[in-house]
Amino acid sequence: MDAPVPHDSSTQPSWRPVINYTAVSLLLCNVHRNTFSVLLPQISAQLALSPSAAGAVQAGNLLAYLAGQLPSGRLADTLSGTRVLVVGLFLWSAATAATALPCLPGLAGATPAAAASGAQLALLLLLGSRALMGLASAAAMPCVTSISAQLVPASERGSAVSFVYACFNAGGVLGLALVPPLAMALGLPGAFIATGTAGLAWAAYGAATLPSKPADANQQEQQQQELQQPAAVEKQPQPQQQGWRLPQLSAASWQQLAVLCYAHAVMGYGFFILQNWIPMYLASLGGQGLAVTGGLSSIPWLAATLVGPLAGQAADRLIRGGRSTLSVRRLMQAVCFLGCAASVVPLALTPQPGIALAVACLTASLALYSFSHSGFHSYLQDVAAGNAGVVYGITNTCSIAAGIAGNLVTGCVVEASGSYGAVFLLFAALNLSAAAAFNAFTSTNKVEF
């Protein structure tokens, strides 16, 4: 799926196997996330959760996810992004399997008092398993950023990062499309156990096969690129590890970090609302049945899976054609923000749109969101170098905090008004503001963090 580059076709880049493993790990991460999201209507009915309570469960998951960002980024930069990813994958897969516990029908007692006690226990188990899932899966994105920044040349980074995130989106498609029939066949507990077990097996494979020092492969790839493309490819800065300390930043770099944090916060606000609430939203519009809602909810993620790699390849072609690397990143991110804003306007202005219109708008929004993989995400790796994991941890903390707020706000607004119109209106306004800020305050020059 990556765009071709002029090097010896008989030699696979040394970073490719690590990127491939990382991509499958991200796929599983999103399968696990969407296993819960698509089953949430049934879990809510079984546990008698209100929309605000469901939003609180989602927010608790994101709060734990937020808490793990900086530690994960630091560990990825100072130790090994691949090893941290494997440990995180093992733990979040175990947490996914453990989500079967609150779904066990045996928790409900025969008497009203026993039933109430069982419901409280189920809610506590649900909160605990979701918190562990959030904390462990915090390793995913900082590790991807650290691995890509250290291993992948700038001229191939857009395609590599877009490929990883395309697999992440494919996990959303698989989770939304396959988990409903799995749950109907095995029950809610069986669906969580099956998807969690798949992640545990992949973690075991990674622990046995991944190289212990993938940065060595990066150095070999750097030498090959410099020998074969001395004039065509911007020289990759060598990572400068900062250990457990944050890097020293100039005033200009602090300004750029601030706008990156704001941009990522807006992206996270919209992303986590869409990921967690699409099934509930479509169900509110008349999507009946677990399989129907799951199938419809998977369409936007399928579009993102297909569009993301195409955007990444286009970005890499522009760079190899002589365009400034950072100007290409800004272009891709502008498409993301403006496209996301425009796509949801019909939903903001129509209180009860038809399901076809809703799916079309959500599909366009997520497809255009995938331009951020060759925009914001690749841009951060370009400018952060060896500190990419830490810097991503900082910006993603802002993203998750916004996602927590978004889930709480969405739950309260929907419970109070019975409509998602105001949710989408705020979504559009935030994306417009982020587009303006990103274009105005990010630099087209290298900024060393």
Image (cartoon, rainbow, N blue to C red):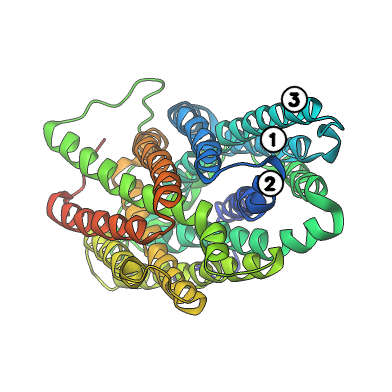
Which residue is at a point 38% across and 36% down the rendered structure image? 401
Q: Amino acid at mark 2?
A: Ile
- Vertical comparison of 362 with 19: above or below: below
Left or right of 107? Residue 226 is: left
Q: Nearer the viewer, residue 171 or 40?
A: 40
Residue 52: mark: none
Q: Position of residue 200 (x, y in %)?
A: 76, 41
Given the image, on which type of amino acid does mark 3 rest? Ser
Q: Quadrant of residue 294?
A: bottom right
Say which residue appears at 69% left-offset and 66% top-offset. Answer: 289
Task: Tell us which disc is closer to us: 3 or 1.
Answer: 3
Foreground mark, 2 or 1? 2
Tags 2 and 1 touching, CB below 8 Å: no
Q: Label 1 crowding class (10 Å Cα cut-off): few <14, some 14-19, many 20+?
A: many
Estimate the spatial distance between the alpha carbons at disc 2 and disc 1, rounded to whole Å: 16 Å
- Marks 3/2: CA distance? 17 Å
Secondary-structure class at tag 2 = helix
How many marks on residues?
A: 3
Q: Earlier in the sequence, mark 3 or mark 1?
A: 1
Under mark 1, the amino acid is Ala
Q: Nearer the viewer, residue 241 or 330?
A: 330
**Mark identifier at residue 43:** 2
Q: Position of residue 449 (x, y in %)?
A: 26, 35
- Residue linked to disc 3: 117
Mark 2 or mark 1, earlier in chain = 2
* Residue nearer the viewer, 411 or 241: 411
- Tell me where residue 51 appears, x and y as whole percent: 52, 46
Residue that label 1 marks:
95
Crowding at mark 2 (Cα within 10 Å: few <14, some 14-19, many 20+): some
